[in-house]
Image (cartoon, helix red, strand yellow):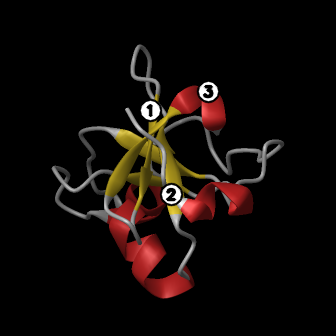
Amino acid sequence: MENTCQHVSEVHHDVEPHTRGGCEDCLRTGGRWVQLRLCMTCGHVGCCDDSPGKHASAHYAEMHHPIVRSFQSPDDWGWCYVDKQYLDADRL
């Protein structure tokens, strides 16, 4: 994957996930998720767009934190919502 995204500079390398038990919004509302995403700015754990709640995208829409990474093994990649671009995990 080629990384031309300028938002990588906004990644916090020491970000701590708010939860390890699932999508924090689904856990709060009793929802369900398919895959999880970790916000690389603040640590919000949200569900992917294949999940009913789409909480990772909703977090981006509200907070404008540009980059998430997959939060489930064996996936190891990032996504920039602004540039609509996959990112190499070793750059995150």
Within 10 Å of disc 2 (Cα), the crowding (few <14, some 14-19, many 20+) is some
Mark 1 to mark 2: distance in Å? Answer: 14 Å
Q: Residue at x 39, y 22 (%)?
A: 75
Say whether disc 1 or disc 2 marks the residue closer to the N-terminus: 2
Expressed as whole percent of the image width and height from the top left, the position of residue 51 reads 20, 52
Q: Residue furthest right?
A: 14
Q: Which mark is residue 5?
A: 2
**Which residue is at a point 35% across and 68% down the rendered structure image?**
57
In this rendering, position of residue 69 left or right of residue 11: left
Q: Which disc number belongs to residue 4?
A: none
Q: Which residue is mark 1?
A: 77
Instruction: Tell me which amino acid carries mark 3.
Output: Asp
| Total number of numbered discs in the rendering | 3
Q: Position of residue 35 (x, y in %)?
A: 31, 38
* x, y percent for residue 12: 77, 52
Element at badge 1? Answer: strand
Do residues under tags 1 and 2 come within 8 Å of each other at their CB atoms? no
Mark 3 element type? helix
Which badge, 3 or 1, comes first in the chain's sequence?
1
Task: Please tell me whether residue 67 is drawn above or below residue 78 in the rendered image.
Answer: below
Residue named by callout 3: 90
Front position among marks 2 and 3 = 2
* Residues under numbered marks 3 and 1 in contact, where contact means CB atoms less than 8 Å apart: no
